[in-house]
Image (tube, helix red, strand yellow):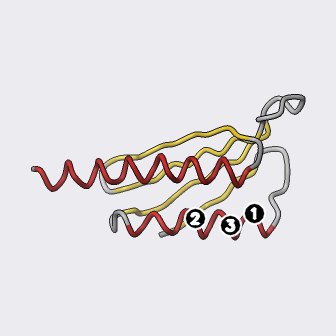
Amino acid sequence: MEIRIQSVRFDATSALEKFIQKKVAKLAQYYEGILSAEVTLKVTKPETVANKEALIRLNISGRDLFASKTCDTFEESIDEAVEALEKQLKRHKDKIRGK
C-alpha cells in the first residue's frame, strides 16, 4: 500500500511520519484491497487547544473511505482517525461477504 503524507503550512517531523506510516499500514490487516492512503495534516485555528487535524483517505477497489479527526496532538488525531477507518473497513468487508 502506498501512503502519501502531506502537511499543510508546516513541516512534519520524521518521527511523526514514521508514526503515521506504522499506524496506517496496520489497516491492511483488516482489508487486503487497500490500494493507497492519503494523509493530510493541518493546524486549524492556532489559538485553540484542540487544533491538530488529521484527514485520512483510503482508496480501496471501487470506493474511498474517509476519516477526519481534530485533537490536541497529531498522534492522537491519527489514532482516532485510524480507529474510525478500522470500523469502516470491517463494515465494508462484512457487506462484501454478505453479497
- Residue 64: horizontal and vertical position, in percent? 40, 46
Q: State the separation of the CA atoms marked 3 and 1.
A: 5 Å
Disc 2 is placed on an element classified as: helix
- Residue 34: horizontal and vertical position, in percent? 39, 62
Q: State the separation of the CA atoms marked 2 and 3.
A: 6 Å
Q: Which residue sits at x=67%, y=38%?
A: 70
Quarter where residue 14 is shown:
bottom right
The one of 10 and 76 positioned closer to us in this rendering: 76
Instruction: Give the amino acid at mark 3.
Output: Phe
* Vertical relation: 13 (above or below) 70: below
In the rendered structure, the answer to whether residue 86 lies left or right of residue 42 reads left
Say few, some or many: other residues with alpha carbon within 10 Å of mark 2 (under 14 / 14 to 19 / 20 or more): some
Q: Given contact means CB atoms under 8 Å apart, are the residues at marks 2 and 3 in contact?
A: yes
In the rendered structure, the answer to whether residue 60 lies left or right of residue 21 reads left
Q: Which residue is mark 2?
A: 23
Q: Which residue is mark 3?
A: 19
Residue located farthest toward the right when viewing the structure as drawn: 47
Q: Which residue sits at x=58%, y=48%?
A: 80
- Residue 60: horizontal and vertical position, in percent? 37, 56
Q: Which residue sits at x=66%, y=47%?
A: 77
Say few, some or many: other residues with alpha carbon within 10 Å of mark 3 (under 14 / 14 to 19 / 20 or more): some
Q: Which residue is mark 1?
A: 16
- Residue 42: horizontal and vertical position, in percent? 74, 42
Q: Which residue sits at x=42%, y=46%?
A: 65
The one of 66 and 2 positioned closer to us in this rendering: 66
Q: Given contact means CB atoms under 8 Å apart, are the residues at marks 3 and 1 in contact?
A: yes
